[in-house]
Image (cartoon, grey):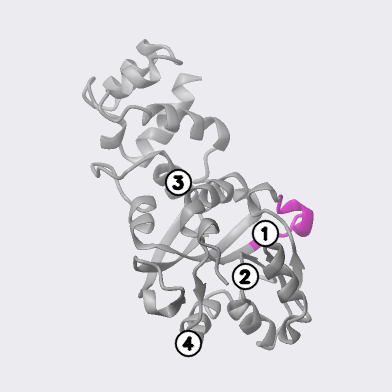
Amino acid sequence: MARQKMGQNFLQDRRIATRIANTVLGGNEIILEIGPGKGIMTGILAETPGERRVIAIEKDEELYNNLLTTEPLSGVEILNRDILKFKIEEISGKEKVTILGNIPYNISKEILDWIIKENGFIVNGTLMVQREFFLKITSLHGSKIYNAQSVMFGLLFDNNKLFDVKPGAFSPPPKVNSTVFSFSRRGSMQIPDDVPGLYNMLKTAFVHRRKTLTNNLGRIYKKDRIIDFLHDKNLPKNIRAEDMTREDLKELYPSLK
């Protein structure tokens, strides 16, 4: 039975599960599935010929125990862990992993933060999330839903919408549509040097959306450095973070340190 407090909506349409699983097959040798639930996608990964290491992380103890006794999953490494506290280096060493998951709606933001934190160990992935959440994390400057997380995720990963999934594909059906999208880590020359520091700056820049960038960041950084940067970029002194491109925000951070 799905536990609503954990945001569980189990994918039950095998055609869609196969379509999602196929996006990560034939690529990386380590596939890390977040929240396998009843194991519909996990089983497809396990049954498809090829040498790969499939690791499924399930927090729910009851689901975890059921997965352990599911015959088609005998070759899958199933861990009873909280993904938000999990470190990819525990399983990969120096090898980067591919991420797969039907992400619980109520912790989508937290899981994306985990992916940002673990970005150095991730080469690519495919996620299914609430459609509105996908629109938020892929939004661009000038949008009212553009935020620190969408900036940081966009600086680290290129993403591509694959398709939408209607509520009837799940049990129980959610009240919203879902979106499946793929993402891949950008080239090393494009990745910021100090991801945690930049992300903290971005969160401060967006903390009060109606305030200017200078007023938000001026609580922590020297205002004259912010103003000088905006002047050099021919940007207005009263600009807000939501009106700045990802690349401009990325370039701003080193000038403040």
Q: CA distance from mark 4 to mark 3?
A: 33 Å
Earlier along the polypeptide chain: callout 4 or callout 3? 4
Identity of the amino acid at label 3? Leu
Residue at 53% over, 47% down: 110
Q: CA distance from mark 3 to mark 2?
A: 28 Å
Read off the residue under disc 3: 155
Identity of the amino acid at label 4? Arg
Read off the residue under disc 2: 36
Between 2 and 155, the one nearer to me in the picture: 2
Q: Quadrant of residue 222?
A: top left
**Residue 70, percent across and down?**
73, 82
Identity of the amino acid at label 1? Lys
* Magenta segment: 87-97
**Of labels 1 and 4, the one closer to you:** 1
Read off the residue under disc 1: 59
Identity of the amino acid at label 2? Pro
Say left or right for 163 vs 210.
right
Q: Is residue 121 above or below residue 46?
A: above
Read off the residue under disc 4: 15
**Residue 136, percent across and down?**
35, 51
